Amino acid sequence: MNTSRTLIFLLWAVFSTFSSCKKFVEVAPPTTNLTQGNVYTNDLTASAALTGIYVRLSQDNLAVFQPKLSNISLHCGLAADELTLFDMGNTDLLSYYRNDLTPRVSQNNNHWYNIYTLIYQVNSALEGLTKSTSLSAKVKDQLIGESYFLRAFFYFYLINLYGDVPLSLQTDYQTNLLLKRTPVSEVYKAIIEDLKNAEKLLSSNYLTADVLRPYPAGSEERVRPNKFAAAALLARAYLYAGDYTNAQTESSKVIENSQYELVNLNNVFLKNSRETIWQLQTVGIGVNSNTGEGQMYVLPDSGPSVNDPYYPVYLNEALVQDFDNGDLRKTNWIGMVEDNSSGKVYYFPNKYKIGRTNNVPIEYFMVLRLAEQYLIRAEAKIMQNNLSGGIMDLNLIRARATDSTQPIDEQLPQLSSSLSQPEALNAVVHERRIELFSEWGHRWMDLKRMKIADQIMPAATAKKGGVWKTTGSLFPIPEKEINKSPNLPGHQNPGY
C-alpha cells in the first residue's frame, strides 16, 4: 500500500474510534488536524490509532456472515464438524460446509485479504510508534506491545487457515508485493518473537483509555490486551509449534495469576468476567448492542428458516451427542428449539445468551479465556509424559462442568489418573471439542494440528453432501491475490 493509503488507514482508525466507540475512548477527540506525521506525536491520537483496530474487529463481528477474522467461528465451524448449514441456498456458506472452496472469490470476500489488511494497519502503527520521540514512555511501550500482540494474533490465524504465507513485517508496497510464501515454522518463530516482545512491554494490568492508568481492582474493562494476554497467546503458539515445555510455562503464568479464575458456566461470556483474558467490547446499538455470535447462533422460537437470513446454521447433532452424562456445558451452553410443523429439534450454541434483541450490553465477544490455558497446559504436560499433571488440569475443567450436589452417578465423572498417554490425548481432544465449540475455529484447527482430520472429516463431509480431500484442510489462496503478486503464481495450495 502507498503513502496515501497509509494516511487513510490511520485517519480511519482514529476517527472511527471516536465516532463508533466512545465507550472505548472516554475522552474528546483532538481539535487539531491529523496527518500521518503527527498521529504518533500525541498520546491520545496514538492510542486511538490502536483502538481503531479493536473497533474494527468488533464491527466485523457484527457482519456475521462475512469472512472477517472475528467471524471465523462460523466458517471454521462449517468446515469442521461443529455446525450444520440449514440454508443450502447460501452458496458462500455451502462451499465452506462441503469443504469445496474455490480460489475464485472477490477481493474482499475472503479471510486472506481481510487479515492482511489488519496486518498492514499494525505494521503501520509499529513504524509510527517506533519512530516517535514525543510519546510518553509508558504509552509508547504499551502501544508497541499491543501492536506486536495483534500482529502475532493475526498471523496465527492466517497460517492456520492457509499454511505458508508471505511474512510482511513492514508497509513498503514494493517490498510486500515481491514477498514469497514463508514456511509455517518460520512464521511461528516470528509470532513467538512478537509475543515475547509484547509480554515484556505490556502492562500487567488492564489499562483505561489513556493507556496510562489501570482500572480499579474489580472494575476492569478487559478490552485491551495486557501482559497475560500475550502469555496466553504465546502458550497457544508454543503448543501449536510443538514446544511443550514453554507452552506449559506460559500457560502457568496466566493460570497462577490472581486476576483470573474459572467462573460459573453462565457467567463466562459476560463482559469482563474473571475468566476473561481478552474480550472485544461491543460497539453496536439496538439489536447490535451485544455480540455478533449471539445474533447469529441464538435461534428464535420458530427455529432456522430460509426466509430469515440471520439464522442459517445450527449445531451438528454429532457434537451434541458427544457430551457426557452430567456435563452442565450441554445444558448451559446449548439451547434448543422445536419446529412446530415438523417436530424437528434444532440445537444451537448458547454460550452467548443475547440474540437479536435490543438489550443493554451485558456480553462482550470473548477472544482469550482461562479455560483454554488449562487445556493447553494439560496437553503440554501429557506430551511431556506428565500424565497425572495433565489429567489433573482436565479434571479441573470437568469439575467446573458438574453439579457436585447431585448424586454421584448423575455427576460428570473425573478422568482416571491411570489413563495411558494415547487415552489422555484422546481426553484432551474431547475436552477441547466440548469446552471450546463455536469459539474462534478451535475445532477446525485441532483436527489439523492433531492429525485427525483425515480420520474424522471423510464421514463428516459425506454427511454434509460433500467429498473430503486431504488438501481441504487448507483454504485456497484467492486467485486475485496470487495474480497481483509476482512471486505467488504457481504456489497455490494443493488441491485447488
Image (cartoon, rainbow, N blue to C red):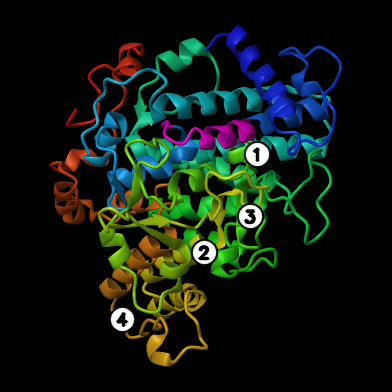
Name the residue rendered at 42%, 62% in the picture: 334
For the image, the number of numbered tags is: 4
Q: Classify mark 3: helix, strand or loop.
A: helix
Q: CA distance from mark 4 to mark 1?
A: 41 Å
- The residue where tag 4 is placed is 419
Amino acid type at image mark 4: Leu
Which of marks 1 and 4 precedes in the sequence? 1
The residue at which mark 3 appears reads as: 228
User: Residue 99: percent from the left, percent from the top?
Assistant: 22, 39
The residue wearing badge 2 is 371
In the image, is 176 to the left or to the right of 433? right
Where is residue 282 shown, x and y percent of the image?
A: 63, 41
Sequence-wise, the earlier of marks 4 and 2 is 2
Residues at badges 1 and 2 in contact (C-beta under 8 Å)? no
Disc 2 secondary structure class? helix
The residue carrying pointer 3 sits among few (fewer than 14), some (14 to 19) or many (20 or more) residues within 10 Å by Cα, namely: many
Viewed as shown, does residue 43 lie left or right of 110? Answer: right
Mark 3 and mark 4 lie on one chain; the one further toward the N terminus is 3
